[in-house]
Amino acid sequence: MVFVYYPSYLPFLYSFWSLEEHGITYYDMSTYRAKLNLIIQGKNADHQFISYTEINSFEVKSENNSYSTMDISTFKNQRQSIFTWLRKPLNLVLHLKNSKIALDASWDQLHDNKNIQARLMNVMSYLDKKIQ
C-alpha cells in the first residue's frame, strides 16, 4: 500500500515550495523514485532549488484557465474538495529553458480559500520583480 497509494497521491496530499531570496525551494515529486524518497525520508528529504535566473516565464494554471501577472485579478476562486482525488488543479507553473515545473497551490486554496487570489497575486508580483 505504501508503495502504490502514497507515491500516486503524494502531490495531492502534500506540497511544499517557498520563495527565497535567490530562488525557489521545493520538494521534487516529478518521478516515482523522488516521491518514494520523500515518503521514506520525510522532513529530512532534500529540497530542490531553482534560481530565479533559470526561470524564463511563469503562470498560474487552474483546471481550465491560465493566468499571467496581468490577468490574475480575473482568477475565479473555487472551493476545493477535502478528498484528494476530487481536488481541482491549481499550480504555479515555472517555464525553464528546457522544462517546466508545476508547484501545487491547491492545498493553500483548500485551507485559505478567502485569501488565495491575494496570495497568488503577491507571488506573481514577487516573481515578476525577481526574474526581470
Image (cartoon, helix red, strand yellow):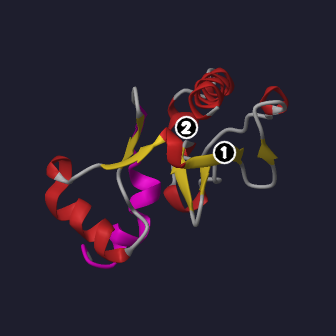
Question: Residue 6: x, y in percent?
Answer: 33, 67
Task: Tell me the element at label 2.
Answer: helix
Identified at 82% across, 30% down, the residue is 70
Which residue does the numbered mark 2 point to in the structure image? 110
Judge the density around disc 1: few (<14), some (14-19), many (≥20) Cα neighbours within 10 Å. many
Total marks in image:
2
Q: Is residue 5 magenta?
A: yes
Judge the density around disc 2: few (<14), some (14-19), many (≥20) Cα neighbours within 10 Å. some
Residue 73 falls in which quadrant of the image? top right
Q: Quadrant of the N terminus?
A: bottom left
The label number, if any, that marks residue 29 in the structure image: none
Question: Residue 21: x, y in percent?
Answer: 40, 26
The amino acid marked with disc number 2 is Leu
Question: Residue 80: x, y in percent?
Answer: 62, 43
The amino acid marked with disc number 1 is Phe
Left or right placement of residue 13 versus residue 80 in this view: left
* Front-lying residue, 60 or 25: 25
Q: Which residues are magenta?
A: 2-19
Q: Earlier in the sequence, mark 2 or mark 1?
A: 1
